[in-house]
Amino acid sequence: MPSDMQKTFYPRPLTSVKFDTAISGRIYVNGELIEGAIGIVDGKIAAIKKRISGARDYGDSIILPGRVDPHVHFRDPGYTQKEDFLTGTLSAAFGGVTCILDMPNTEPFLYRYPALEEKEYIASRKAVVDYGLITGMKNRILDEKALKRSPALKIFMAPTTGGIVNELDDLALQYLLNLMKDYGKPVIFHAEDMKFISNEKTGNLIEHLRNRPNMAEESAVRRLISSGKPLHMAHITSTEAVELLKNRTYGQTSEVTPHHLFLTVDSDFENEAYGRVNPPLRKKRDRDALWDALRDGRIDMISSDHAPHTMEEKEEFETAPSGIPGVETALPLILVAVKKGLLEFKRAVEVLIENPAKRFCPRKGSIEVGKDADLLVIDMKKVRRIDAEYLHSKAGWTPFEGMDAIFPESVYLRGKRIIKNGNFEGEKGLGENLWTKHPAGHNGHSEPEREG
């Protein structure tokens, strides 16, 4: 970026450009904060300049790209008492997320084209941010027509909500990964090995951890890395797994969740069932290893794994389903971690915003000409406590109650402001399924840059 910021990066002469919207402030461009303005035309960033006449000025606030959350469960259709596409995407918007990837374990399980069509119709009428609908596999059946309209394939190596398990021997795993490489679609794995998982009755988090020990994740991650094929490993949680990540090959990426970064099996919960999740919360040494791996590049990105259940479902630990809501609080929690010195600001932007977009949705994730004008306005001085009463998920609870957070002041989706000072200004149906609207521009699969 030129130091004088005079150059426009819009391909037409300045005299021919009339911006639909323009905003100014401290813009995050190419790894740096610069004083400048962004001009927007037809929902895309058209120019980055030192000044634009009439721009809405955000002063000293930081303007970041919108966040892509590559792992959410919005429960629609089939479990809409827990969440639906309206409340889920509304929560996303308030948390600075402008594109989500929804997982297939809804009802019906999304692996056939008719189920995809149904889910597309539902989302198109409710979503307030952009989205993609990830497909799954059942009985080793892949539906090519559904895959073509999907951002990725999700493989459940161990059971979670919905009960689907994809058991693959090494030969079947290699065949699947070769096939998906031909499709040009990433494969996302819930990496726990069924051989090491127990179904004993549990009354607390320690017993739940005993049922799903570190070894289950370590074994699955070792298998995936040994395949040598491009793939993505969801919600890494253990010391042993992050050590194995040193051996990844090109195209193998991983994510971590805020609940595994901020909580442990020993955390003080109002209701211990609020911490029940798969993979489980682990020990402090595992949490510390996750932070180290996030800082040094072994873990590439943060996803929320937003998986809400109702308060009534979480009343009794033994019968409580596993899952934690978090799409609205992920970025706000990490921004406070930056203030506390746990993570550098540049690295936080990489793992929250840039790397998820590079991997899955390259039209998003950076402030540059031609990209979608998804923008967040952040005031790093405005720290407030998380209060479930003011969150927007149907769950009605959060395991992060009372923790410090920095929420976006304003959120723009393709140039339209949808959040302003804690108020929603968008509309139902504004969100687009990017893999049907613009399929050629939303196949990611690139390798995020790594530290060292």
Image (cartoon, rainbow, N blue to C red):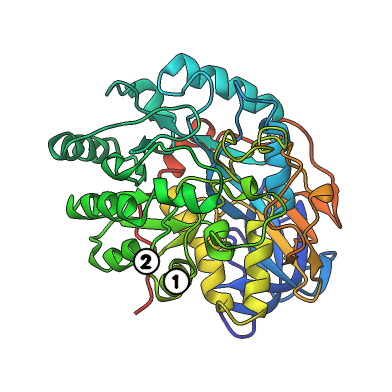
* Residue 1 sits in quarter: bottom right
**Tag 1's secondary structure?**
helix
**Tag 2's secondary structure?**
helix
> Residue 25 appears at what percent x and percent y?
76, 72
255 or 322, nearer to the observer? 322
Q: What is the CA distance from the residue labelled 1 to the residue labelled 2?
A: 7 Å
> Residue 211 appears at what percent x and percent y?
40, 45
Q: Callout 1: 10 Å neighbours few (<14), some, many (20+)? A: few
In the displayed structure, does residue 252 sit left or right of residue 107?
A: left
Q: What residue is pinned by disc 2? A: 239
279 or 181, nearer to the observer? 279
363 or 18, nearer to the observer? 363
Q: What residue is pinned by disc 1? A: 285
* Disc number for residue 336: none
In the image, residue 132 sits, relative to residue 108, either above or below, namely below
Identify the residue at horizontal 44%, vertical 75% (top origin): 292
Whether residue 19 appears in this view of the structure is: no
Whether residue 34 appears in this view of the structure is: yes
> Residue 128 appears at what percent x and percent y?
71, 38
In the displayed structure, does residue 214 sit left or right of residue 343?
A: left
CB-based contact (under 8 Å), mark 1 and mark 2: yes
* Residue 225 sits in quarter: bottom left
* Residue 267 sits in quarter: bottom right
> Residue 426 appears at what percent x and percent y?
79, 41
Identify the residue at horizontal 49%, vertical 21% (top origin): 116
Q: Callout 2: 10 Å neighbours few (<14), some, many (20+)? A: many
